Image (spheres, coloured by chain):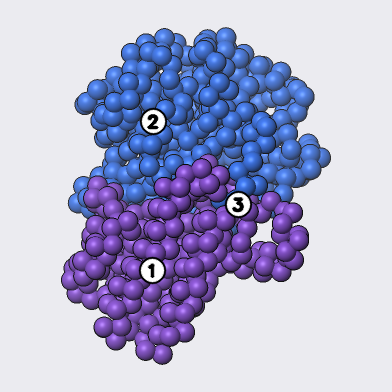
Amino acid sequence: MKAAVLGGTRGMGRALARRMVERGDWVTVLGRDGEELSRSVADLSARATPGTQVHSAVCDLEKTAQFGPALEAADHAMGGLDVVVVTAAVFATQDKLEDDAALTQKLLTVDFANTIVFCEEARKKLLGKGKGTLCVFSSVAGDRGRKPVVLYGAAKAGLSHYLEGLDHKFRQQGLKTVCVKPGFVRTGMTDGLKAPPFAGEPDEVAAVVLQAIDEGTPVVYVPPIWRLVMTAIKALPRFAMRRVGF
Amino acid sequence: MYEYLMSHSPEPQVSGWGNLPGPGREVRAEDLTQVWDAPLFRGLARSYGDSSLPPPSRPVVVSTVLADRVLKFDESTGILRAECGLSLAELNRAFLPRGFFTPVTPGTQFVTLGGMVAADVHGKNHHVEGCFGQHVTRLKMRVGSGQVLECGPDLEPELFWATVGGMGLTGHILEVEFQMARIPSPWIWMESERVPDVDTYVRKLKEAAPEWPMTVGWIDCLSTGKNMGRGILMKGRWAHPAQAPQHFPRPLPNLVFPFTAPQFLLGRQTVQAFNFGYYWKHFRKKHERIVDPFSFFYPLDFVRDWNRAYGPRGFTQYQCVLPESAGEGAARRFLEVLTRRGGASFLCVIKDCGPQGKGLLSFPMKGMSIALDIAVRDNTQALIDDLNAFVIAEKGRMYLAKDAFTRKEDFEKMEPRLAEFQRVRQKWDPTFKFKSAQSIRLLGDPP
């Protein structure tokens, strides 16, 4: 399999790219910083099974003009492309967002609008080849409107919605969509936050996601226990939800 | 991500492997350039006491485990360079199948390269290969001025040898480059032997040294009289491909110790029963076989969080090295001090040590090392004081990565190299930017 991973220099994307090259999948890492990209290419190359190719291309989710060329570069470098993964996103706490309109706009733009624009490019690219898999990291935060993630959750809810629609419309035509909903995972993004019960590690998430990509699972919660946690939270009546802190 | 996750308890606490907490909290950083002002880095926090705990005045310690990329690996030379948070478990997962292994491994693979340098770890092959620091060719560090620089045995050697074994007190270790060892097969040829008492054990340990690259053993420190310190001596070497199975060894199962054990569980009777069983399980006098490297090097790793077995009060490991001048009876005399205080320990390991390395605070010296796990009780401080008095009289020293109870004046008596270490440290960090709870306790750093 030949995969482009936007956000593969960090966190869950890094762990996923590692699992891919270790079993012989070819990977092009997409990210915004050239130095970071070259360090990640070195890491993946050292871990890759012999004969596995690792490439990189610059792609910043804030710069829509880079999306098409980055996917084209990945396709060209690997001589094919059948999986596109998006793990990159902006995160900020609700408190911080409420005090900073510019940051709010940036987060909503990157996590919702630009991510979808990127997915549209990827959709066209993969459908143009006849088939493919688009795997995008949304969040459990998009499952219900909640006090600590009003804004971030709104962006992720929109993204999850889009991914579901995409899956219904294009699966028949050969495009499988995998919507990953991480609960709390101990990465650089959640750094400084106190980990709740059921916090996951990036590598265990990567193992689950890779299997979901292989099988084309439409929605996957990671760690898997979060499916239960969110089922419970979604079942809470409104008056209860208004009283609790989560 | 969630508000309730953000709410820190008024006095957050952090601890090492011994579960002895101190004030502070840990943050994980993927990009280590962002955390230039942290007083201390730590890896997987497998040091037992307070060496990876931050100073109370700046109570944040940075965990480096997300900075774990391999940056360079040359298959022809075996030189590997990686970010400091790369764990030995990851390294083994990626490189053992390719015929490479770390030149020196401690008794757990849940340690990071940065931590291995900071504690200058040693292993079963110390009498042949020395400590890990001896195989390090370059370090990338951030020193007190904020400057990022490279050092090695031939580049800023003073800083390098203060950092090797320097417990993270000379600066932030960012990247580690070292020489990997090429192994003939991923299996170990092991010979184990039941030994009737501690004097025989020590004699056989020394006899095995010229022939076996790896030696280690466990002794029963509760048996007394003529059985005192009976034990099992294990000797090993990497198996020749012709003797080894063709398949790759299966990694250890991953069990979790699910809760903190109640305190009565680790009483004297439990230890006695365990020791009796462990000794007689090895019914044959001598046993030779092929074993996988995980159970040979990391017998305890297959139970995650086994430190919970020591109960809510936590535990400490006492590890000291006794020089050759102490004589062959030194281990017996050490056990007598322990027994007199009623110390009970599941784990008592005696290892052979080769010559002292160049690391200014590196632990091993020519002689033998004795390590024991001790559940914390009311008399633990008195027990450690007694053991330290014995070690000082024999001109030995204790291991900083394990320590939680040693007194400053005792440490100074054990460590004639301390003044030189402090001189180099102050040259690179005149304002004590880098410090730990342990350096305040033992080195007299300003709190």
The numbered mark 3 sits on a residue in which chain? A
Contact check, label 3 and label 1, Cβ < 8 Å? no
Q: Quadrant of residue A234?
A: bottom right
Distance (Cα) linking label 2 and label 3: 29 Å
Instruction: Give the colour in which the image draws chain A.
Output: purple
Report if residue A56 is visible in the image.
no
Answer left or right for A68 relative to A244.
left
Which label's residue is closer to the chain start, 3 or 1? 1
Q: Nearer the viewer, residue B389 or A71?
A: A71
Residue on which the image places disc 1: A116
Q: Amino acid at mark 3?
A: Pro
The numbered mark 2 sits on a residue in which chain? B
Task: State the image coordinates of residue B40 (x, y, percent, origin top left).
Answer: 46, 29
Q: Amino acid at mark 1?
A: Ile
Task: State the image coordinates of residue B42 (x, y, percent, origin top left).
Answer: 47, 35
Q: How many marks?
A: 3
Q: Secondary structure at mark 2?
A: loop
Report if residue B91 is visible in the image.
yes
Query: Which residue is painted at 33% across and 25% down in the image?
Result: B146
Distance (Cα) linking label 3 and label 1: 24 Å
Residue mark closest to the camera, 2 vs 3 = 3
Query: Which residue is painted at 33% across and 77% down in the image?
Result: A123
Task: State the image coordinates of residue B254 (x, y, percent, origin top left).
Answer: 57, 58
**Of the numbered discs in the image, which one, if any, rests on residue A148?**
3
Residue on which the image places disc 2: B36
Instruction: Give the colour in which the image draws chain B.
Output: blue
